Image: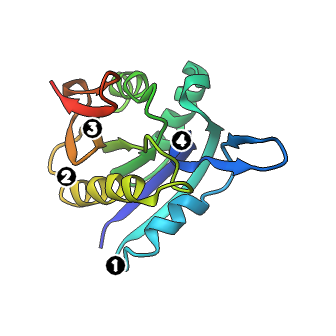
Amino acid sequence: MQDILIINTGGTFNKRYNPLRGELQVPEDSLALEGVLKYFYNLKYKIINIIHKDSLDMNDSDRQEIVEVIQNSSSKKILIIHGTDTMDKTALFLEQKIKDKCVILTGAMVPFSIDYIEATANIATAIGYILNCQKNGIYIAMHGLVDIHNRVFKNRDIGVFQSI
């Protein structure tokens, strides 16, 4: 069984409604992620929670933190839970710094706490791919699609990720 490092950065995937503030917030835990992973009975993984932001608020300092976690890990297979709005920017940043690992970014357009189907499907797709990943690189897994990051884009007009 292969070790997978899962880096949970926040994003819409993790958001939960805070009734005291009347808004969706990114928590500093991995409850949403653990809600999906409990069904992967034969998966060996480690979760690291960092950043805890909507991806629109992420900057290159946050991206460098992701790079450092990846570089300090002995795992060759990395799954990153990331917001969808700047997933492409983070993937490009990682491509410039990480060459010797299979890294997949995924997330959700709707919070797991509101609708678990999309988030679960995206994680399941990413895990299925990463377990069989034969070539190092930076990939995006969204809406049933997995490809090298620069061949996938978020089509904001229709609200889905597509292949170029």
Vertical placement of residue 161 versus 7, above or below: above
Query: Viewer-nearest of labels 4 and 3?
Result: 4
Q: Is any part of residue 101 visible from this angle?
A: no
How busy is the neighbourhood of tag 4: few (under 14 within 10 Å), some, or many (20 plus)?
A: many
Q: Secondary structure at mark 4?
A: helix
Q: Residue at x 36, y 32 (%)?
A: 98
Residue ID at (66%, 56%): 29
Residue under circle 2?
133
3 vs 2, front mark: 3
Q: How many marks?
A: 4
Q: Which comes sooner in the sequence, label 4 or label 3?
A: 4
Identify the residue under disc 1: 42
- Residue identified by numbered label 4: 12
Q: What amino acid does circle 3 point to?
A: Tyr
Q: Are marks 4 and 3 in contact (CB under 8 Å)?
A: no
What's the CA distance linking mark 3 and mark 1? Answer: 23 Å
Type of amino acid at the residue the image marks with label 2: Cys
Which badge, 3 or 2, comes first in the chain's sequence? 2
Q: Please give the residue where the numbered disc 3 appears in the rendered image.
A: 139
Mark 3 Cα-neighbour bin, 10 Å: few <14, some 14–19, many ≥20: many
Marks 2/4: CA–CA distance: 26 Å
Q: Residues within 10 Å of mark 2 (few under 14, many from 20)?
A: some
- Residue 97 is left or right of residue 126, and the answer is right
